[in-house]
Amino acid sequence: MLQPSRLARTARSSAVRDLLRLTERPDVLSLAGGLPAPELLPVDELAAATARVLAARGPAALQYGPTEGITALRELVARRLGHGATPDTTVVTTGSQQGLDLVARAVLDPGDVVVTEVPTYLGALGALHWSGCRIVGVDGDACGLRTDLLEERLRAGLRPKLVYVVADFANPTGATLSEQRRVHLARLADRFGFVIVEDDPYGSLRWRGMRLAPVRAWTDRVVTLGTASKVVAPGLRVGWLTAPRWLAPSIVIAKQGADLHTSTLNQWIVDELLRDERWFDAHVGRLVDSYAARCAVLVEALGGILDVSAPDGGMFVWGALADPSISASALLTDALDRGVAFVPGTAFRPDGGDDHRLRLCFTTLDEAGLRDAAERLAATVSDPGRGASAPGGGRPRASAGRGG
Amino acid sequence: MLQPSRLARTARSSAVRDLLRLTERPDVLSLAGGLPAPELLPVDELAAATARVLAARGPAALQYGPTEGITALRELVARRLGHGATPDTTVVTTGSQQGLDLVARAVLDPGDVVVTEVPTYLGALGALHWSGCRIVGVDGDACGLRTDLLEERLRAGLRPKLVYVVADFANPTGATLSEQRRVHLARLADRFGFVIVEDDPYGSLRWRGMRLAPVRAWTDRVVTLGTASKVVAPGLRVGWLTAPRWLAPSIVIAKQGADLHTSTLNQWIVDELLRDERWFDAHVGRLVDSYAARCAVLVEALGGILDVSAPDGGMFVWGALADPSISASALLTDALDRGVAFVPGTAFRPDGGDDHRLRLCFTTLDEAGLRDAAERLAATVSDPGRGASAPGGGRPRASAGRGG
């Protein structure tokens, strides 16, 4: 008789996640992850910072703390965010994943409409699901969310309570929302009365072009999500958000119920590392240089295999198979046989579209590894073997029968 | 037009939390908290463990990790929990507060009934709220939840999907659920088909009496919540749960949406400290000895002021004013004026009852501090001043007008 809740039963199945477990095989060169380069994680600096924090703060660094986060880090984050962010409307979160979950709780009632760009970050859909909202996708392109299409939908009567965007170097497309569209989106929020969630995990990882003012520079209806995951270390689970004044208290109450507060120790560690601006800026500089070089190598090596447009920053290249009738999902099993992994485009949209596209992450392999991976991918594409040519063509095959 | 979600608007107000901020004034001896003794937090051992973890595991300790938690810690926790707990149904959580939140998401649909003992842990109500469930209180006494009253309600037609108990040294009462009632509760779960959440933050902190088998020894319908907060450090936000096999996957999917996973670094730190059984057992022994002595001092010093029954472990003494017409809430403002703080009993139940009771935490003051606090409390009780005698008598006064 006992069974999970309705939302648990309808939670997006982890088929892709299961498939991606195969990519962890040691013989597989993975372009599938979304992880920072392990060799650039600041292990030694973090060890030293931890020792300093514990020596200076003692038990206070290990005790319960305020739900909204330690004051020092909220002040530091608000200063870095600028554009009117204040410490009292800034909340430290357990990664930016939790930031989105808290905003969903604080804003959404069951049945409310949420708009996301499609394709979009899978984890966003995972967090939004638990509010019982209805997710409506609006297409994006190389300049991000098509705000003209959004306006059409709004004029036709769509009334989202929340619109979710990754404005800089989106996951999976790598696209950056143009300035014109940022302004347009902000105007639409003001006119139609919705909250924009501007998720910014990658904004600091820019190697080309000018940094654009965030959407929140153009309207006060924005919740900005940020994180230390991509610029310090994801394993700390320290993120932050800054919210409109009417919403911040509800987010804090939601967080109190969710996990009381984010790790006190990890907040102090991040504070210690971000406060050392000379080190931090140099560290981000090293990440940017490395990722820029790796991205260039991968894009070049993919020439002739996939249609790709090189992003201006971030961690992902979004590629398309020249023949749109070939299924990237079906190709993945062959790719794994050849020792290379990627995420098929269908994984980033609920409607099964974009199946001739692939997301390729260039951060976790070195340049030789990226060239090798691209070769393996080329071999897969030029001779798809049984995967893509299997009966049923474009249908992905279940991974269950493949063992591993 | 924009406003927070319905659940955010109806979230339990933080009046008590606001009042408790006053208890953080340096001139106040606080019996109000629920924090471990700061001087017993293992700062040096934790610093050494962190250094060892980072040296041995390097970037892997800082990288993204599996949603359910690192295997080593799940294995260790399952072994310590025993009674059939297995690593594959054990999930590492961001504190046990998150454990309850995840169970609520995975089990409850809006409108479902949840039974809690009253009085009960405030944070539990805070987590359960966000599922949109209906919370029904069933009285407890010195032997914990009155399972006879629960059975009456069940026979009368109440159909909870979940029953929440703290079986060992409950917060706020310090009561331990008797063995007979544990068996009874388990039988009721089997007969009426509900899930029991057995929250066990304090079980290791026993200084008197035999440890009883947990409720989950008697039925497989139990989710057990545990935490490193009281035996290592709360600021790490590392807890765990072990769930029935049919439920564990839903909890993992819920966690994926909530925060992807718990801090990898902190999981390895807790693993490192718990794995050193000799150190860990000695450390818990020191906590138990210290808390037992402090509890005895406070109970003795309260003689003649309050009716108290000394708990067999944990962190709290539950006291009653001799005159049940005196409001502990009203007394609190006077107590703060005299430099002592406690939590009034009303804070632990939604119905405003237990207002002549007080929760007193004995862990954060030393023995001299406890005696001093008891004297201040005695002065407050014997000469309540304007607080309890204010017009309106039993009504707590707002804290807003009191400044600081």
Image (tube, coloured by chain):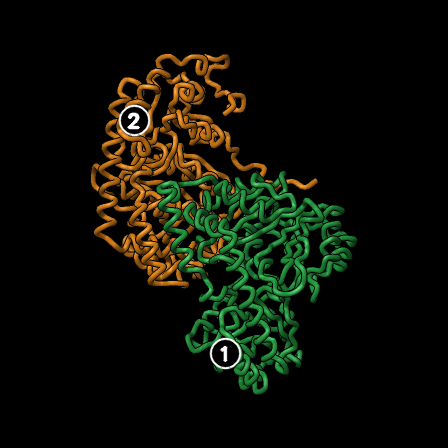
Chain colours: A orange, B green
Looking at the image, which is closer to me, A45 or B272?
B272
Q: Please, is residue B354 above or below residue A172 in the view?
A: below
B293 lies left or right of A101: right
Q: Please, is residue B150 above or below residue B249 in the view?
A: below
The answer to whether the residues at label 2 and label 1 have Cβ atoms under 8 Å apart is no
Observer able to see residue A152: no
Q: Which amino acid does label 1 sit on?
A: Ala
In the figure, residue B173 lies in which quadrant? bottom right
Q: Which chain carries label 2?
A: A
Element at badge 2? helix
Observer able to see residue A35: yes
What residue is disc 1 on? B368
Query: Residue at point 63% right, 83% down?
Result: B304
Instruction: Sort mark 2 into few (<14), some (14-19) or many (20+) by Cα contacts within 10 Å.
Output: many
Q: Mark 1 lies on which chain?
A: B
Q: Residue B181 carries which label?
A: none
A35 lies left or right of A206: right
Estimate the x, y position of residue A39 in percent, counting from the top left.
Answer: 30, 38
Estimate the x, y position of residue B385 in percent, counting from the top left.
Answer: 54, 86
B3 lies left or right of A308: right
Instruction: Sort mark 1 into few (<14), some (14-19) or many (20+) by Cα contacts within 10 Å.
Output: few
Q: Which of marks 2 and 1 is in front?
A: 1
- State which quarter of the image contains the N terminus of chain A: top right
In the figure, residue A49 lies in which quadrant? bottom left
What residue is disc 2 on? A370
Element at badge 1? helix
Q: Which amino acid does label 2 sit on?
A: Leu
Query: Residue at point 59% right, 41% down?
Result: B86
